[in-house]
Image (cartoon, rainbow, N blue to C red):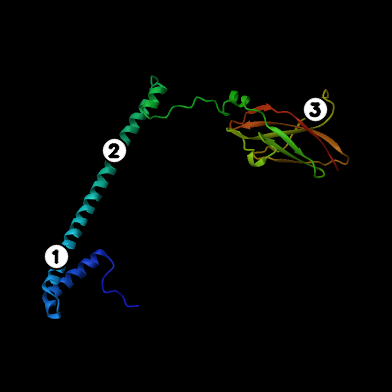
Amino acid sequence: MTRSYIPDSDLGKLRWIRIFNTWFQTHGAAYGFSPAQIADLTSQTAAYIAAMTEHKTVQATARAATQKKNTARRSVISLARSLAQQLQSNAALTNSDRGAAGLTIPDTTQTAADPIALMMITPPMLVLDFSIRQQVTIHWGPNPNNERRNGRPEGIQGCQVEVARDGSDTEAKEWIPLEPSTKSPVIHLVEENTPTSFIYRAYYVGNNLKHGPIGDSARCTVSV
């Protein structure tokens, strides 16, 4: 494929049209072109040169304006940030004024990092799957029947499941903690020679490593 004699870039096109127009003014008539055609090319070449000059001027102006805008933005944001930080540390500043000034309003809602808030979170529910011999799969959380919708509550690091041999409700139980879990379920491997009943209970552990309240227990008998 033959390469076009007209360059691709604006600068290349400008250089080419100047050369061609100069030649065409001198030799165009000799090749049968009318004075009107020669004059039209001269006029449009001049218009293109003027437009390119204006374009370069606008580009230079735009670059200068952009630089000026960025400098002004950095300056005012730096000043405003410094003033806002001083304002936020002022004990007399109200949350109403913070909001009106566009500043962050402190979150006064208790989170699980607060021991009191942690105790207010509903304890984890347990669902046991003991369909596999010598194994209990313990699903824990707010929705243990559906692990896809069983995320940890906000501020909760994980869950501690404890197990004990199941006996009468009045009998004292020796609760043994299983491996701490950050994701449901927990697997309890049972090493027994006869069918054995177990009882499980669990509580959340907050990000502050404090324990939440113990939830309802769940029972099962594991086959061997």
* Res 155 quadrant in image: top right
Task: Count up the numbered dots.
Answer: 3
User: Is residue 88 visible to us here?
Assistant: no
Task: Give the residue at x 59% y 23%.
Answer: 116
Task: Give the residue at x 46% y 27%.
Answer: 106
Residue receiving disc 1 = 43
Q: Quadrant of the N terminus?
A: bottom left
Residue receiving disc 2 = 75
Tell me the SS state at disc 3. loop
**In front: 174, or 170?**
170
- Residue 215 drawn at (x, y percent): 70, 28
Tell me the SS state at disc 2. helix
- Residue 193 drawn at (x, y percent): 88, 41
- Residue 114 drawn at (x, y percent): 57, 26
Disc number placed over residue 173 in the picture, else none? 3
- Residue 141 drawn at (x, y percent): 67, 35
User: Is residue 29 visible to us here?
Assistant: yes
Mark 2 vs mark 1, CA separation in Å: 48 Å
Q: Is residue 14 above or below residue 155?
A: below
Mark closest to the chain's N terminus, 2 or 1 = 1
